Image (cartoon, rainbow, N blue to C red):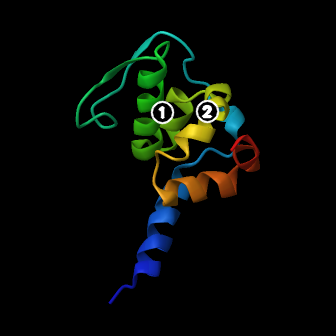
Amino acid sequence: MTTPSDVTVLRRARFARRLPTALAELVGPRHGTVRLPTHLAWSGLTAFDLDRPRLRMSYYRVVIGEAGHDDLCRYLDRGLLLALWPTLRTLVSRDIRVVWENAFPELRTAA
């Protein structure tokens, strides 16, 4: 039987495997409308105008929660992630927040 801590460890390991090696690998768009594929945006809105703050935050929340390594690098931008992180970290799960902040100390600093 698995315990809640076992589930947490497994979930965090799954998120950690997806991460880029460095935030510099995040070279996604900064402006304009981006249409996410259905394997990322599978339950609603698929087009996000990154020039609109609420849509930009929703976009980052979807990508961080659903994307694999290649999609993270393709759809996220390092500068935007750092700027959004103080708020974004409160909108993602604790497991995602812990994994990202442990892997990238600059996110802890931004928070």
Which of the numbered marks, if any, corresponds to residue 12?
Answer: none
Q: Residue at x 42, y 45 (%)?
A: 65
Left or right, residue 14 beside residue 1? right
At 50% across and 28% down in the image, what residue appears? 75
Q: Which residue is mark 1?
A: 60
Which amino acid does the dot numbered 2 rest on? Answer: Leu
Q: Which residue is mark 2?
A: 81
Residue 57 position, x and y percent, is 47, 30
- Percent x, y of residue 12: 51, 64
- The local crowd at label 2, few if under 14, some if 14 to 19, many if 20 or more residues have their Cα within 10 Å, is some
Quarter of the image with the N terminus is bottom left
Q: Is residue 13 left or right of residue 22?
A: left
**Residue closest to the far left:** 43
Q: Position of residue 105 (x, y in %)?
A: 75, 50
Tell me the SS state at disc 2.
helix
Inspect the image, locate mark 1, and give the three-letter code of the amino acid beneath it: Tyr
Check contact, mark 2 vs mark 1: CB within 8 A: yes
Please tell me which residue is depicted at 56% across the width and 57% down the height of the picture: 16
- Rendered-image quadrant of the C terminus: top right
**Which type of secondary structure does the marked residue at label 1 adopt?**
helix
Is residue 13 positioned above or below 97 on the image?
below
Q: Residue at x 62, y 40 (%)?
A: 86
Residue 72 lies, in percent from the top left, at 52, 37
Instruction: Compare residues 1 and 70 and report the one nearer the observer.
Output: 1
Using the numbered discs, state the Cα–Cα distance from disc 2 to disc 1 in whole angstroms: 8 Å
| Mark 1 surroundings within 10 Å by alpha-carbon count, few (fewer than 14), some (14 through 19), many (20 or more) | many
The residue furthest top is 32
Pointer 2 or 1: first along the chain:
1
